[in-house]
Amino acid sequence: MSRIWAKLNKSVNIVIHDTRSPKVFLLLIFLIMSPFIPILKAHIMISPSSTRAGSEEVYTVTVYGERPPPTIKIELFIPSDFRIIEVENISGWRYEISSNKSHLIIIWQGIVHYGWSINLRFRALNPNISGIYKFIGYQIYLDGNVTIWDWEGLWVEIKGGDSQHTIDHATQQSLWILVLFTIPASLFIPILIALIRRTRS
């Protein structure tokens, strides 16, 4: 056992000594970082990230094929404060526009192979209220898996508007729930106090 440990220790010392060479050192760094390279490129992002309120803007959504199998669909959820004017036609891709209560949705269908990327563009009218608007991207793969991108790379700052937009739609829903519970409580508490006073008297 001591002989095996001695050989292992000698091999480690050789590797450490060899890293003094720039080529060996760079190779070692590459081998350590290579498993994380796809992760570093794994995202959907939008540009520009900052623009003016009430103006028309051409937005570019960059999609990376961050893992095999290939990406076959992108769904971009845009805050309903924006108004989509047009979506650029790209050869080999098709799109449709949908919506729900809080978002406009652009659905692109095409292929992005692993290690490749594509730029998807649309023109929109910006809201008149300044603040940070959070877009959300859904990346759907050929095997049916889905990656949800909800991060700073999909945030757009609108400047020069009338007032500050700081509440996202999830917060708005929470506030509505709070209001719905607060109103009945405010009506019930006086009745409860009156009943307590009556029982004491």
Image (cartoon, rainbow, N blue to C red):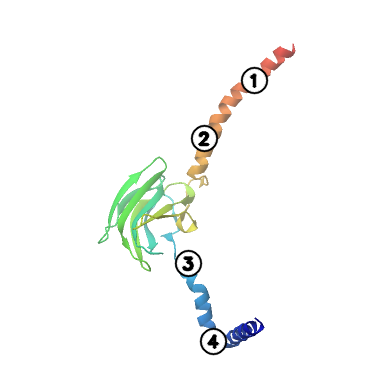
Q: Are marks 2 and 4 in contact (CB under 8 Å)?
A: no
Regarding mark 3 in the picture, which secondary structure is present there?
helix
Compare residues 176 and 199 and report the one nearer the observer: 199
How far is mark 2 from mark 4, CA to CA? 61 Å
Q: In which quarter of the image is the C terminus?
A: top right
Amino acid tagged 1: Pro
Q: Nearer the viewer, mark 2 or mark 4?
A: 4
Residue 114 appears at what percent x and percent y? Answer: 37, 66
How far is mark 3 from mark 2, CA to CA? 38 Å
Residue at 30% in and 52% down: 86
Determine whether, in the image, residue 121 is placed left or right of residue 28: left
Q: Quadrant of residue 118?
A: bottom left
How far is mark 1 from mark 4, CA to CA? 78 Å
Label whose residue precedes the other's in the sequence (3 or 1): 3
Task: Name the residue at the right extreme.
Answer: 201
Q: Is residue 41 above or below residue 59?
A: below
Residue 150 appears at what percent x and percent y? Answer: 47, 54
Residue under numbered circle 1: 190
Residue under numbered circle 3: 40
Regarding mark 1 in the picture, which secondary structure is present there?
helix
Q: Quadrant of residue 7?
A: bottom right
Compare residues 164 and 197 and report the one nearer the observer: 197
Label whose residue precedes the other's in the sequence (1 or 2): 2
Residue at 55% in and 88% down: 21
Residue under numbered circle 2: 176
